[in-house]
Image: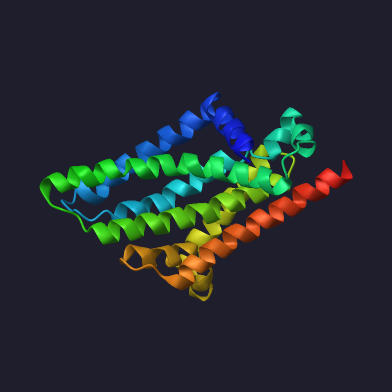
Amino acid sequence: MLAVIKRELKSYFCSPIGYIVIGISLVIYSVFFYITAVKTGSIDLTNLFYCVAMYGLMFMVPLLTMWSFAGERKTGTEQLILTSPVSMLGVTLGKFISAFILVLIPAICSVMYFGILSYFSMPNIPIYLTSMLGFILLSMAYISWGILTSSITESPIVSLILTFIGIFLTTWIPQYVTALSDFSLINLFIKFLMGTIDIAATVTFITLTILCILITMIVMQRRKSVK
């Protein structure tokens, strides 16, 4: 699995995609930090995480995961994965973890915003930490979905669209259709912004992540057996 992670990270940083995603992410963080903290004079970083979750992940995750499996088919390197001595679970986890690392890097950089605000007044550390935890769990669920869509299609563009649609539906549709509010991952994420670690929300995020990873593994295992 470590070999897969190294290979994926190398592919991200030996091509523009890794730098583009991290660069866009940092711009998104900076813009929302200015809007939610600097402009309003607030020391509350929960709005920053909320805005990045609502708008940033919708674009960051599809760009990262679109090439994970569909890109291998497009470039003709899928056979290397299917004949690799690494188990399909290891391959899937390797691709998931490498994409997660690229989402995590800008999130960790948000510590500098915490430091900036601390110069003026100490932000609420427990709420900052629970917000970060909720953001990480939400990102994991979205990334696993992106990996899954990439495994079921031959085209990275189709994977990007499917991932975007999935994130969009679970983010925005429940905001307007109250009957679907139980399907909103953002609503679950908001509970972390209140400074509490919600067990039900945590279990839901982890379950969705594991489920998508397992389905991806099964899809790829079937392709391997056919080959």
4 with respect to 46 (left or right): right
Give the colouring mode of the picture: rainbow
| In the rendered image, the vertical position of residue 113 relative to residue 8, given as above or below | below
In the picture, residue 7 is in which quadrant?
top right
Front-most of residues 151 and 62: 151
Front-most of residues 176 and 118: 118
In the displayed orientation, state which residue is furthest to the top.
14
108 with respect to 220 (left or right): left
62 with respect to 34 (left or right): right
In the displayed orientation, state which residue is furthest to the bottom.
179
* Residue 87 place in picture, x, y as percent: 73, 45
201 with respect to 215 (left or right): left
* Residue 69 place in picture, x, y as percent: 69, 40
Q: Residue at x 47, y 57 (%)?
A: 137
* Residue 92 place in picture, x, y as percent: 66, 46
The answer to whether residue 50 of the structure is visible from this angle is no
In the displayed orientation, state which residue is furthest to the left.
120
Front-most of residues 184 and 141: 141
Q: Residue at x 55, y 49 (%)?
A: 143
| In the rendered image, the vertical position of residue 25 relative to residue 181, given as above or below | above
Q: How many marks?
A: 0
Q: Residue at x 48, y 74 (%)?
A: 178
Front-most of residues 149 and 196: 196
* Residue 61 place in picture, x, y as percent: 52, 45
Quadrant containing the N terminus in the rendered view: top right
In the picture, residue 54 is in which quadrant?
bottom left
The answer to whether residue 226 of the structure is visible from this angle is yes
Q: Residue at x 87, y 40 (%)?
A: 227
